[in-house]
Image (spheres, rainbow, N blue to C red):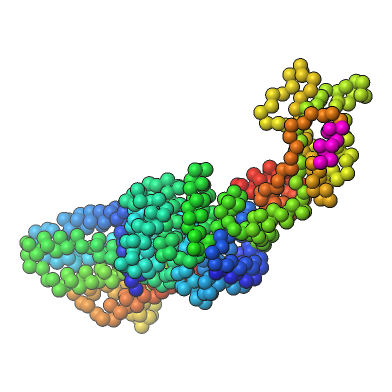
């Protein structure tokens, strides 16, 4: 449906997209994921024919985006980033304008507008000026305009950018509705959006494709590289014990766990909502995060044995299943140009990707 | 062609959905009325609009850049150019539609001035031929100015820059030939005068409609609109 072969785009001397190849089959819902500046919008603009590739070819429904541009454009519905619209126009006038531009026959026009307006839940604002609408409504007007001519391919650039959580959820379910019988390409830097709506995720960073596959496959692949961390909550004394050479019970347990084969590292984490030790209690609940080595993906049993032998009470022991977010961050971090950036903590990097 | 009309109709409508269109018309009518009252509508003066067309040509110099400045600039600034250029519409169609809208607006702006003709016809017996020719000259001059403005509007996303750029080019177009002609040898001077739109249009006020002058304006407009379309196309080459 969309064939991208060895496409590159260079702005001046800056390579925005480098040798990207992608084949999207009919009916697929593909998420293009990457941090800002990764080359998502450039890739999308090349598919829609707004920008010509510096090298390589793109075909949409078999039509080359440069040589057969008009036909390629006709088979596309496109919602650009931040949905640019004419604020002075009324919604129905704008939709009618777009329908005419796309050559929707006069007889079908009214129906097409009503259908698109209905699907995007716009009927109540049809007579209002676009400039007076909320951001969520504007986004929906852009979406309605993109599906007016019932295109087989729908391309949405950051459809939930700048929306509040409710609007994001609405947009997501709308995209799911629209993806029936359509090929959809959604770009985003927001993970849940892609994770929940897409059959296939393509992660792009610094102009190159870094990962490509179904979300579950990507996770399985990732699990082989980075085993899941184990989270453990146990009831132990945390105060230094003079009889034990100044070490606490926690220190001893942690040392024993650390010595177990297959354990890479151990870190203590605060338990959200737990009151801090008032100095009265002798023991308290402590959460440890144990990172296994890749050779030992599952350490739950040896950990449980060690705790039982030591007579330690514990209430939680589980593997934290990796999320697409971790995979995403890993890809981004691997890709970071400087060591300083790759050393940045997960949360910092996540913030960076979110801005 | 129908798509160019679609774009023209939307653009024309937008002139009236925002204050700009109303302000331009009001300003044009207000200044025209002042001149009419002071210069033409005086007992004993001939019932003609000859002086008046001179005033309008001067006004057009400032009004037409105001009409054309937002045509494409606004789309470049707001990003609406992206849905426009990704719709199955060519750059020529877009520019033609935009230009047509500006010309329609110019005609709309001129329509109320027919009231002055009405007043003259009511009080006296004016020469309708000369007035018709004057209006034709006004329209042709406006079309050329708007074509220059359309090109400027395609080149920048800033409306004020488009306005000033158009104004500058129009001044050069109008004044440079006359200034240069004064110092140039005679055969060159004649040619230079022929290149000055305001000099060429002067005949119209006297009721002279010269086909070569009509062709000059139409071809000039076509040339500027074509360059505008090519400049918009060139965004895809970069």
Q: Which residues are magenta?
A: A301-309
The x, y position of residue A129, in whole percent, is: 35, 50
Whether the magenta-drawn stretch holds residue A305 is answered as yes
Camera-nearest residue between B130 and A37:
A37
Residue at the spot x=23%, y=54% of the render?
Answer: B30
Residue at the spot x=41%, y=72% of the render?
Answer: B92
User: Which part of the image, by quadrant, shows the N terminus of chain B?
Assistant: bottom left
The x, y position of residue B108, in whole percent, is: 24, 62
The x, y position of residue B95, in whole percent, is: 39, 69
Secondary structure mostly seen in magenta is helix
User: Which part of the image, by quadrant, shows the C terminus of chain B?
Assistant: bottom right
For residue A21, which quarter of the picture?
bottom right
Q: Answer whether residue B237 is visible to the viewer in this image.
A: no
Residue at the spot x=60%, y=52% of the render?
Answer: A195
Residue at the spot x=51%, y=46% of the render?
Answer: A169
Camera-nearest residue between B106 and A272:
A272
Camera-nearest residue between A145 and B195:
A145
Left or right? Give the position of B49 relative to A296.
Answer: left
Whether the magenta-drawn stretch holds residue A253 is answered as no
Q: Answer whether residue A91 is visible to the viewer in this image.
A: yes
The x, y position of residue B140, in whole percent, is: 28, 71
Left or right? Give the position of B237 relative to A96.
Answer: right
For residue B41, which quarter of the picture?
bottom left
Q: Is residue A119 above or below residue B127?
A: above
In this rendering, the count of numbered labels is: 0
Left or right? Give the position of A355 relative to A174.
Answer: right
For residue B80, which quarter of the picture?
bottom left
């Amino acid at each position: 449906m969309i064939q991208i072969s060895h496409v590159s785009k260079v702005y001046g001397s800056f390579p925005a997209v480098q040798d990207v190849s992608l084949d999207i089959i009919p009916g697929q819902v593909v998420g293009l994921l990457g941090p800002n500046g990764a080359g998502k919008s450039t890739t999308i603009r090349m598919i829609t024919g707004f920008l010509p590739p510096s090298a390589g070819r793109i075909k949409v429904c078999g039509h080359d985006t440069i040589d057969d541009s008009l036909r390629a454009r006709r088979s596309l519905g496109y919602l650009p980033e931040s949905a640019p619209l004419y604020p002075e126009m009324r919604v129905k006038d704008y939709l009618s304008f777009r329908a005419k531009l796309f050559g929707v026959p006069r007889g079908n026009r009214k129906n097409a507008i009503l259908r698109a307006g209905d699907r995007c839940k716009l009927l109540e604002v049809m007579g209002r000026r676009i400039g007076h609408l909320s951001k969520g409504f504007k986004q929906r007007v852009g979406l309605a305009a993109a599906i007016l001519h019932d295109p087989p391919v729908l391309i949405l650039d950051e459809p939930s950018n700048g929306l509040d959580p409710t609007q994001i959820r609405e947009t997501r379910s709308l995209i799911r509705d629209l993806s029936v019988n359509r090929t959809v390409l959604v770009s985003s830097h927001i993970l849940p959006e892609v994770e929940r709506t897409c059959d296939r995720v393509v992660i792009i960073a610094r102009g190159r494709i870094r990962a490509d596959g179904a979300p579950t496959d990507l996770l399985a692949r990732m699990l082989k590289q980075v085993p899941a961390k184990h989270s453990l909550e146990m009831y132990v004394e945390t105060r230094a014990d003079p009889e034990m050479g100044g070490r606490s019970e926690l220190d001893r347990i942690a040392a024993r766990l650390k010595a177990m084969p297959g354990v890479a590292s151990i870190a203590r984490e605060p338990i959200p909502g737990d009151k801090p030790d008032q100095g009265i209690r002798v023991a308290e609940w402590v959460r440890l995060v144990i990172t296994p080595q890749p050779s030992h993906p599952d350490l739950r049993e040896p950990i449980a044995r060690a705790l039982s032998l030591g007579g330690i009470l514990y209430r939680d022991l589980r593997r934290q299943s990796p999320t697409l977010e971790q995979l995403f961050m890993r890809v981004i971090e691997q890709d970071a140009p400087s060591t300083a950036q790759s050393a940045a903590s997960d949360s910092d990097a996540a913030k960076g990707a979110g801005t | 062609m129908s798509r160019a009309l679609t774009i023209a109709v939307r653009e024309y409508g937008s002139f009236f959905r925002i204050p700009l269109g109303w302000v331009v018309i009001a300003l044009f009518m207000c200044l025209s009325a002042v001149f009419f009252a002071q210069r033409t509508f005086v007992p004993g003066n001939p019932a003609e609009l000859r002086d008046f067309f001179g005033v309008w040509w001067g006004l057009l110099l400032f009004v037409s850049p105001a009409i054309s400045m937002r045509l494409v600039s606004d789309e470049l600034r707001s990003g609406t150019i992206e849905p426009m250029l990704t719709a199955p519409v060519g750059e020529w169609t877009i520019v033609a539609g935009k230009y047509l809208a500006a010309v329609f607006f110019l005609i709309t702006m001129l329509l109320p001035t027919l009231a002055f003709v009405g007043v003259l016809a009511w009080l006296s017996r004016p020469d309708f031929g000369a007035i018709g020719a004057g209006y034709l000259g006004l329209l042709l001059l406006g079309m050329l100015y708007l074509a220059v403005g359309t090109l400027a509007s395609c080149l920048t996303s800033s409306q004020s820059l488009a306005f000033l750029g158009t104004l500058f080019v129009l001044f050069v177009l109008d004044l440079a030939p006359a200034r240069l002609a004064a110092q140039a040898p005679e055969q060159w001077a004649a040619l230079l005068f022929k290149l000055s739109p305001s000099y060429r249009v002067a005949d119209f006020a006297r009721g002279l409609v010269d086909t070569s002058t009509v062709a000059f304006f139409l071809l000039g407009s076509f040339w500027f609109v074509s360059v505008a379309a090519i400049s918009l196309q060139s965004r895809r080459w970069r």
